[in-house]
Image (spheres, rainbow, N blue to C red):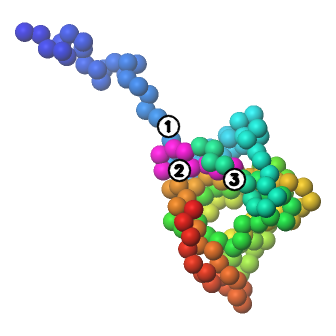
Amino acid sequence: MNSDVSIAGDPLAIPHLLPPVPAYPVTVAEFAGLARTIAADRARWAPRVRYDATTRWYDRLETGPGYEVWLLSWLPGQGSGLHDHGRSSGVLTVLDGELTERALGGNGETRRSLLPGHQRVFAPGYVHEVVNDSLEGAVSLHVYFPGLTEMTPYACTSGKPAAKGTFAG
């Protein structure tokens, strides 16, 4: 008597008939690479950009297993406020314009000017603020892993961050 395996053959011996195993980013370097790939594909993100005079504009561009990608726009003077990203790590990539990042850590405050192509990678517990101090609009791409579910806003007193409370995002 014939079995299905003897008729069709061993399916594991025929890899071309199996669906491809999806390749998803799993390391910080791969998430940074994903952000660079999306940044290089201007036709993918540029038509989606909007500006809002009252607040930063944002749009979820992509989701995958354990991560999400957000597109943000910043008019002059708009900022994020001092915050962390809960249990998420992330990659921030500037696409257009110029942003200023202020980060607070054990060694005090660090300020960086971020131009198109610049990336910042951060782990859970990283406290920072991003602001558009320029006279032109700016656009940035943010990859969070795991996906962003909470952010803690901070007040800065005596050079050290003090949590103001947590809000879900």
Residue type at tag 1:
Ala
Name the amino acid type tagged 3: Tyr
Residue bounds of the magenta highlight: 63-71
Q: Nearer the viewer, residue 109 or 169?
A: 169
Q: Nearer the viewer, residue 51 or 142?
A: 51
Q: Disc 1 designates what residue?
A: 23
The amino acid marked with disc number 2 is Tyr
The residue tagged with tag 3: helix, strand or loop? strand
Circle 3 residues within 10 Å: few <14, some 14–19, many ≥20: many
Q: Position of residue 106 (x, y in %)?
A: 64, 81
SS state under label 2: strand
- The residue positioned 53% from the left and 50% from the top of the image is 67
Left or right, 154 with respect to 167, comes to: right
Of badges 3 and 2, the one in the foreground is 3
Above or below, 18 relative to 45: above
Q: Secondary structure at mark 1?
A: loop
Mark 2, mark 1: which one is toward the viewer?
2
Q: Where in the figure is residue 113, as x and y percent of width and height?
A: 82, 63
- Compare marks 3 and 1 and give the one earlier in the sequence: 1
Which residue is at 56% across, 70% downward? 167
- Eyeballing the image, is 1 above or below 84? above
Label 3, label 2: how many angstroms apart (C-alpha)?
16 Å
Find the distance from the CA under tag 2 to the CA under tag 1. Answer: 13 Å
- Identify the residue under disc 3: 58
Q: Which residue is mark 2?
A: 67
